[in-house]
Amino acid sequence: MVEFRLPMLPQPGELVWSVNINGTEVKLNIESNAILLDVLRDQAGSLGTKRGCDMGTCGCCSVLVDGEPRLSCLTLAADMNGREITTVEGLANGHQLLSQNNNPTNEEIKTAIEGNLCRCTGFQQIVDSIRAASDIIRENNDIEDSTSAKSDPHPGFMEGN
Amino acid sequence: MVKDKEIQGYRQQPGKLPFSKPGSGGKNSFSKPINLENIPVSQNGIKDQPWGPHRHDSLISGQVIGKSTALVDSAWKVTGQAQYGDDVRLPNELIGRIVRSPHHYAKILSIDCSKALDLPGVVAIATGNDAKNKFGVLPVTKDEHAMAVEKVRHAGDLIACIAAENENIAREAERLIQIEYEILESIHDIKEGLEDSEYPIHDRGQYHIGNSNIQKRVFQEFGNISSLEKNTVVSHQSNWTFAGVNHGFTEPHAVVANWSPDGRLTLYTPQQVPHYVHRSLADVLEIPMHQINVHRTFVGGGFGGKSDPFPHEMCAAILARKSGRPVRITFDREEVFWVNRGRHPSKIEMNLHADSIGRICGIETDALIDGGSFASFGHVTTYYNGVLHTAPYEIGAFHYTGARVWTNKPASGAMRGHGAVNSRCAVEVGLDDLAEKLEVDPITLRLANLLPPHSATITGFRVTSIGMRECLERVKEESGWSDKFRKMPLGKGIGIGCGFFISGSGLPIHWDPNKFPHATVHLKIDMDGGVTIHTGAAEIGQGSDTVVSQSVAEVLGLPLDMIRIRSRESDTSPVDLGSYSSRVTFMNANAAISAAMKIRDELIKAASDITGASEEVLVIGDRRIFDKNNPAIGVSYLEALHKSQEERGALISSGAYRTPPMGKTHKGAAAGLAPAYSFSAYVAEVSVDVETGKTIVDKVWAAHDCGKALNPLAVNGQIIGSCHMGLGQVLSEEMRYGRTGHLMNPDFLDYKIPSIHEMPEVIPIIIESNDPEGPFGAKEAGEGPLLPILPAVCNAVYDAIGVRTEDLPITSEKVFKLVEKKCREQGVSSPLDLKPPRLEFSDLQDTLEKRADLHSTRDIERRLDSSREEYYNGAIFGFDPTKSPEEVDENWSVRVIPNDDYLHSPRLAGSAWKHIERRKMGD
């Protein structure tokens, strides 16, 4: 890619950034003043990490850094060198809360997600779904594989129908 | 004459294996028996129908309708795979940036882009001169440009746009663009908008109202206003101030424009109404609509805030055209507030009158609303502030004056509960006050004044199904109302509020509904048996893809996993008005049902051909079509499908929906007309700290009549989410403007959306009134549920501490000041010594209860009786219910223009009528 640089402004330095994103070692050249959110979206291809408010109020940009939730819009990417980052795309194995406490109370759930603004649900359903997820984890229930076969359009008839 | 040789089909050779059935295989290889619990009694099932049968009963196959269903696109979202606006990344993209005005109101004298263009990495710059054609939501009020032409109208208005290799360069280029302004005197006070001005913010030519900034004015009078004084025994009067609020959707606006090598434009945008953008792009770019493909991305919340065609969408297309490369523009949160289109800041005067037997003999409303700098949906909003509170109550007379003015603020527009929320709050608080003055229970007062099913409102809206009574009864019972109302200790209170909202707008803004349907849905089924739905209904997170899929699945007897929906691109979607005015479930699901019925007929005919059973006895069950008297006789869905494909390959059908002819003919009669209306009643319980004024909402019982919950999970979600959004407006949300007119809180730190800790427990209660024209009986559930929460909380605050607020949001400071005043009135020094309000019912309570009981019987009879007579608003006052009152009483007027008498002492918004339209000057 052609480099376009602004001649009149002091330039940030570059550094080699080496992190683990969702279990994969990633090495990128980033600008020393880059924000983690921008690096994740624009360079690492994690478009699931969203920009919502730019100031740490909405929680859209949350990622886990070494297992702890963190707002990527308020995080300097350079500081994350060598860390393990989990984005929404890598969350299949469970949320930070549930990994530490698989039977949280409603209050614990509320505290865990208090940094997120949600404009659709009114939060109640998020609490319900975390509760449902904790049930699945505790009871060791299987979740259907999304790639398993869908319905047969040519079903047979069973007596008793 | 030689006959064409008939083409012979393939003849299978004896002894060879038959062809395999393409498309067969998969899970659940046996058809599930029909579960009679899902089948309504009208179809010999055992599902109760307390509201009577429905025209879609015979289409119920028991698959998905009425069952809580995860949204069909939810897996994309929870795994982070959904592509929202800014997630569309095309190769070789440029970053677009908007240059915005720092001034509230100014003439642009010159723009010099030369230095910016010389900056390496800047590829294109456009200004207002590149696109001078106007656009806008409504054909009659096109008043926006892609970028300012001649003048800017609010801080944040668009002046130019830049496409550059990256954001840093675009920002530097923005600094290098030199703009000369001549600053004009700006207007910020809503009342000033009513006055003549040297430079009105817009010039509407001969339709301009004087030299004022009045964008729209409405006068409506129904009934005999002059007799009001004679009949009234108690009145309520209040003057409300409602702050403007923003949608606060999570995804900021973002757009990507790309002109493909064949010269067609694709615009990727998170839009609620792709069709408006489609039209506007054609206007602005001066190309035909067929040259444009509007691609709706996933939408990260809209709530009305993504339904206008936006200038930045035009900018992206213009920049992409100039640069020959894809251009992506993404807003930061501050820019979202500059675009706004949120709920109007409003001043509303509410006057309610009741007579000696507790009838609502008059409503007089005056609403002045602040439109900011552009029209947006403003004509409609101005009407909605009045006409949407003419139900669910029977009213003796209705008088409404409304005006929408331009000010130099970011434009107001449509937001969830469009135009109805603020005045509904004022009405419902007013009813609480009337009940207090009549010494009756406010719920009983409401129950004794409801319109019956299949009636007409005072303004002529046709009400079909109505579950208002059931909503009120349920929340009363479940909240333990009778033990709590006016009985709780100081600081604890309970309050009621109701709502009424349109289920789809009767008039498609851009066309005559008789010439083109409101909604169209296409279906395509090929050899594999999967059903592809094409619809233009915009999935904005509300679940429109799911509800349309559910409707098709139900009619065809298929599980949802066999349905795939394509609703994103205008290239493949039928023209559709998109997601506003809560129209999608009602209109698109109806269109989908009609399309699916055509396929269903084909499948039944094919099954009849194969089995020899007559079409009349064949029914559709789980992936199978069979004789209802002998289910062993039947074929699989796939067999029937392949049979009907023999002569023509894929099955294709198209279904459409249009509203029936409705309403009266006076000017503005179409505003508020809908094929059905939703109703809701909420009870809120609050705690108010009298020493600090802080209000906490503890619990909400929320009953909503959505006709039929096609997907109860989604309906409950809409109810709880509406409570959250409405709570924001009543407790904390406010677009605050400083003394110089500057917006002080365009960010989520200072614009206070309730967090999880402010959110009460909400008990959603679904009432199913089985609308005769709704799909399977359904009506809207997306906007109406927001309305009642505001007045329910206000009324609960009164119950708790005895103060009535007329100023939203009710922040601690405001409540504290009211408490101080109350202390002075009661002569107590500590707010802890305040006496909470108490109420001894008068004799009227008994009268009202009896009337409510009678009406309850009347309503049940009416909803079950298909040969019922007409019922016009006014019957409760002694008019013949079967005739419109203006036909029988010469004093009963319908007026839409004020007379001189009124103009002598108009109300605030009513004073807009003092100006003369320019075309009528010199008459």
Image (spheres, helix red, strand yellow):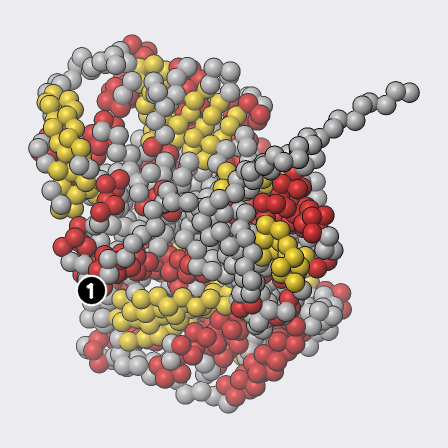
Query: Where is residue B894 drawn, in percent x and y?
Result: 67, 59
The answer to which of A136 and B448 lies nearer the viewer is: A136
The residue at the far right in this view is B1
Q: Quadrant of residue A9?
A: top left
In the picture, measured across the screen, residue B226 lies left or right of residue B442, that is right
Q: In what quadrant of the picture does the N terminus of chain B appear?
A: top right
Query: Where is residue A87 drawn, in percent x and y?
Result: 22, 40
The answer to which of B708 and B628 lies nearer the viewer is: B628
Which residue has dot 1 on it? Answer: A105
How packed mark 1 is, by other alpha carbons closer than 10 Å (few <14, some 14-19, many 20 or more), is few
* Residue A82 shows in the view: yes
The answer to which of A34 and B429 lies nearer the viewer is: A34
**x 65%, y 63%: residue:** B630
Answer above or below: position of A21 versus B70. above
Check disc 1 and report its element: helix, strand or loop.
loop
* Residue B354 shows in the view: no
In the picture, measured across the screen, residue B164 lies left or right of residue B650, that is left
